[in-house]
Amino acid sequence: MSDENLTANILESISDGVFTVDEDWKITSFNRAAEKITGVSRKQAIGQNCFEVFKSNMCESSCPLRRTMKTGKPLVDRSGFCVTKKGRRIPISVSTALLVDARGRVLGGAETFRDLSELENLKKELASRGPNPVFRSKSPSLEKLLAMLPAVSDSTSSILIQGETGTGKEVLARAIHSLSPRKDGPFVAVNCGAIPENLLESELFGYKKGAFTGADRDKPGRFALAEGGTLFLDEIGDIAPPLQVKLLRVLQEREYEPLGGTKPARADVRLVSATNADLAGLIAEGTFRRDLFYRVNVINLALPPLKDRKEDIPDLASGFLSTFASKMNKKIDGFAPEVFSRFYAYDWPGNIRELENVVERMVVLADAPVIGRDLLPTELLTPVVSLKEALSGAGPAKVARVRDEAERECIVSSLDAHGWRRAETAAALGMDKATLWRKMKRFGITGP
């Protein structure tokens, strides 16, 4: 097979759209995925100007391919959208590169584009269920993680998610599964720390009839139940060393033996693990195998604790408030500003799960349209520190931004609840109408 045919076959097999252009911007190749995403056939595309076929919001002012052709430098993962032949708008990420021959002469350019519709739909679905720690964040570290999700999800490599209890490790694992080629298969979660050591092996690998007293039938394990899908092992650091050996064999050989079995079973699963433990420390102590660590830690994703992303507290707390108020059929406008001050001052050892529980408790006890500090649990009724102290390490600009976002969120929620009637809203917030008007002007709040 010639190099040209090999390249063509590779391009046809990938799920990203790819097209190439010559120096006159005429399309010279257009792969199958590009046809599927744009709705334009290869026959219609070849020979046309790229901007007549691939209609993107980046074409006019910030075309990535034009910039690459001008500078010679590739661009990676530029976000935007394209419009299909039927007029549907699709979110995409675009990467570009020059096409050169063996002597270094520029022949044209290549553009790769990935359909991000599934990621956007997942964000909307999760948002409709209430806030979640992964997809509602202003934290730079989580924005970086979000950008990695499509590539990470599309791979078959094992993933290790690290983070404190309550940071959303299982939510992230489910998101990865939902974005992966295995999304139509099962997602099976196992909390390794919640199952007794002597039962975990049979729970994972299953057993055959007669394997032990009381085994009167075959029972499939979690590996079998996750066949064709994703197996999520939470708190993998709690697995005992003897069972670690068997798990290592599954990852190396892609097979396992049920208890009482006489022949191995194949394991067609994608493994995602999670831990709140220091696995490096466990390795040093000799309680966790180094070779298993390397197998489960091919891709490492770290979720920061809530105390390191306090800029997310207004969105998370308000989202939980909306969810619980709806479930309990209560009309609640929002939190009083001093509640957010207490939220910022607290370190949230239980992370987002603790915040969710606190908001649920406050909604249960609420008998007024605005939740005040009197409903805060005892542990949050500590002396209030300044936002500058609460957001330790943050610069003045970040402190001011977080404070303003909290106040703006409170005002908008109350305005929504009172039909944007300023007199009622001001009374509910405990301020006069002139103060409310000044704050609305300051925050750019002009209407629903």
Image (spheres, rainbow, N blue to C red):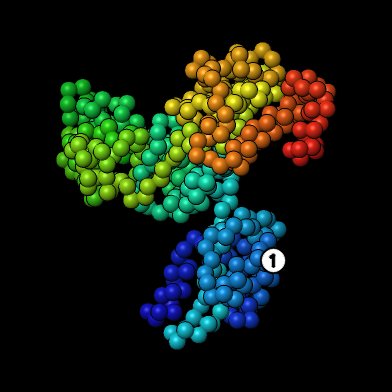
Q: In this image, 264 relative to 26: left or right?
A: left
* Pointer 1 local density, CA inside 10 Å: few below 14, some 14–19, many at least 20: few
Q: In this image, 235 relative to 182: left or right?
A: left
Q: Nearer the viewer, residue 201 or 331?
A: 331
Placement of the C terminus among the 4 image quadrants: top right
Expressed as whole percent of the image width and height from the top left, the position of residue 151 reads: 46, 54
Residue at the location (30% across, 46% down)? Answer: 296
Which residue is the site of mark 1? 61
Q: In this image, 359 relative to 237: left or right?
A: right
The answer to which image quadrant residue 37 occupies is bottom right
Residue at the location (44% across, 44% down)? Answer: 177
Residue at the location (61% across, 23% down)? Answer: 339
Residue 448 is at least partly visible in this image:
no
Q: How many marks?
A: 1
Expressed as whole percent of the image width and height from the top left, the position of residue 169 reads: 43, 37
Looking at the rendered structure, the secondary structure element under dot 1 is: loop
Expressed as whole percent of the image width and height from the top left, the position of residue 190 reads: 35, 33
Q: In this image, 328 relative to 440: left or right?
A: left
Q: Amino acid at mark 1?
A: Ser
Expressed as whole percent of the image width and height from the top left, the position of residue 335 reads: 65, 23
